[in-house]
Amino acid sequence: MKKINVVASATVYDGVSELPSGIQTLMNKAIEARNNAYAPYSKFKVGVALLLENNQVILGNNQESAAYPSGMCAERVAIWKASSDYPGVKVTQLVITASSSNSIVDRPVGPCGACRQTLSEYEINQKEPIEIYFMGEVGQIVKTESLLSLLPFSFDSSYL
Ligand code: THU
């Protein structure tokens, strides 16, 4: 028996003004997307902007349903839009923001487990990392260099 270390590293920015200018632009688009989310039940709106290597920006936001499990997270809406409209085009950066009408979201909101799994499929297929930036409505922004760094011991097609 031995113990191994599983290390995840991330960069933390203290505010949007510290971000590289291209990421600030993506964050503004993610905020726009967030404001258009359809989240009447949770009141928790999530917006995503992702940049493709052909310079197209794809937006996504969460879409809820009165039959709750039938809704969908912003990250999956965005990645599926990207793959549907631009199949096989690599994703270079993905930016996430979340807000709530119940309280101010002042902590970075990372993608949920199911979204990490879904996103990992595309990162593995494209053989190049996707930079992930995530924040709440205000406050710090976390950046990871890849999706897989958010998903240690992940499951992928090599097991099938
Ligand atoms: N949500 C996302 O869009 N992305 C996440 O990673 C976490 C949760 C949405 C789903 C639901 O509409 C609302 O936030 C509350 O869970």
Image (cartoon, rainbow, N blue to C red):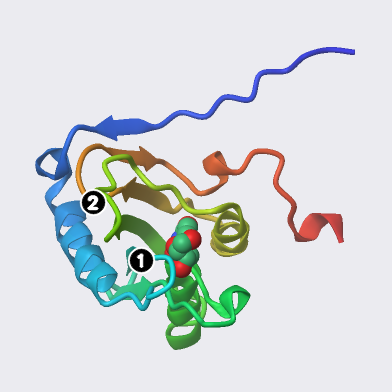
Quarter of the image with the N terminus is top right
Give the residue at x 19% y 32%: 14
Q: Is residue 61 above or below residue 21?
A: below
Which of disc 2 and disc 1 is earlier in sequence? Answer: 1
Q: Is residue 60 above or below residue 144?
A: below
- Residue lying farthest right? 1
- Amino acid identity at mark 2: Glu
For residue 79, side relative to residue 19 (left or right) = right
Residue 126 in view (yes/no): yes
Residue that mark 1 sits on: 43
Q: Is residue 158 above or below residue 73?
A: above
Residue 96's image quarter?
bottom left
* Residue under numbered circle 2: 137
Residue 54: where, in percent of width, then height?
32, 74
User: Among all residues in the image, which is located at the extreme top?
Assistant: 2
Q: Of helix, strand and loop, which one carries label 2?
A: loop
Can the viewer see residue 90? Answer: no
Residue name at image x 36 percent, y 66 percent: 43
Amino acid identity at mark 1: Lys
Q: Position of residue 115 (x, y in %)?
A: 55, 60
Does dot 1 land on a helix, a strand or a loop?
loop
| Quadrant into which the C terminus falls | bottom right
Q: Is 33 placed left or right of 42 in the picture? A: left
Look at 16% across and 62% down and name the residue there: 28
Residue 157 image point, x, y percent: 77, 61
User: Could you say which is closer to the camera, residue 144 or residue 86?
Assistant: 144
The 10 Å Cα crowd at callout 2, few under 14, some 14 to 19, many 20 or more, is many
Is disc 1 surrounded by few (<14), some (14 to 19) or many (20+) residues within 10 Å?
some
